[in-house]
Image (tube, helix red, strand yellow):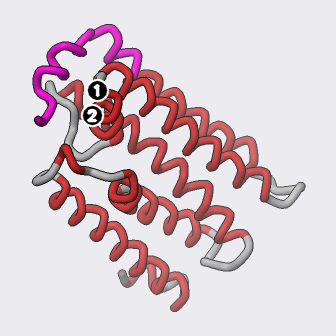
Amino acid sequence: RDKISKGGDLVLDEFEAGFKDARIGQYLDEELKSKPTQITEEEMTLSYKKYRSVMGTAGKNMALAQRPLGEIFYLGMAKAAEGVGCGNEIEDSIKNGFVKIPSWPLYYSLLAEDVKKGFDITLEKSNLYLKDARLAIELLPEDFSHKEFLEFLFLTVEHYNQFWYNKLQKANKWSEFESKLPK
């Protein structure tokens, strides 16, 4: 907190608000574990505050929370973090031997009544997040010096998610996951 406050009151306020939002996302996750078959899209979006808030706020504060650059960084980093969240859920599901609760793979698997389709759609969801993240690059000033780095960063997230999805394909855990879905 002391180090962050050196960026000024606005930076500290943004950090504290982001941290509070992240805690809300974590709290909601605990709540959703008690009703895994009833999770809504709105609740999943709120749950993703934990990703959006932490990295989005970090992005905003890289520009000392000054508009428009701070907001552009927030948008890019928040959406990239949500994309990473999808990859994390795939990884966690592989490591745990069941579809993570709560998660986009669980949400989509239950709606589709098909685990493989749930993970396929989760990968598409991650790509939608990354598409939004890449829109932030379009908003940067024409002469912004770090566009290529940001493009590489978002490409890395895309590869991370694809890596875990490919691992899941090879592991062929579909029937195991299907048998362990909450009823």
For disc 2, the marked residue is: 110
Disc 1 is placed on an element classified as: loop
Residue 13 coordinates in the image, percent (x, y): 46, 86
- Expressed as whole percent of the image width and height from the top left, the position of residue 41 reads 38, 51
Asked if residue 10 is positioned above or below residue 69 in the image, the reply reads below
Observer-nearest residue: 142 or 78? 78
Residue marked by disc 1 = 113
Q: Are marks 2 and 1 in contact (CB under 8 Å)?
A: yes
Name the residue at 10% across, 54% down. Answer: 34
Snapshot quadrant of residue 181: top left
Horizontally, residue 120 falls left or right of residue 39, namely: right
Q: Which residues are magenta?
A: 165-183
* Magenta residue check for 52: no
Q: Does residue 74 lie above or below 111 as drawn?
A: below
Q: Quadrant of the C terminus?
A: top left
Q: Residues within 10 Å of mark 1 (few under 14, many from 20)?
A: some
| Residue 144 in sight in this render | yes
- Dot 2 surroundings within 10 Å: few (below 14), some, or many (20 or more)? many
Residue sitting at 35 percent across and 12 percent down? 169
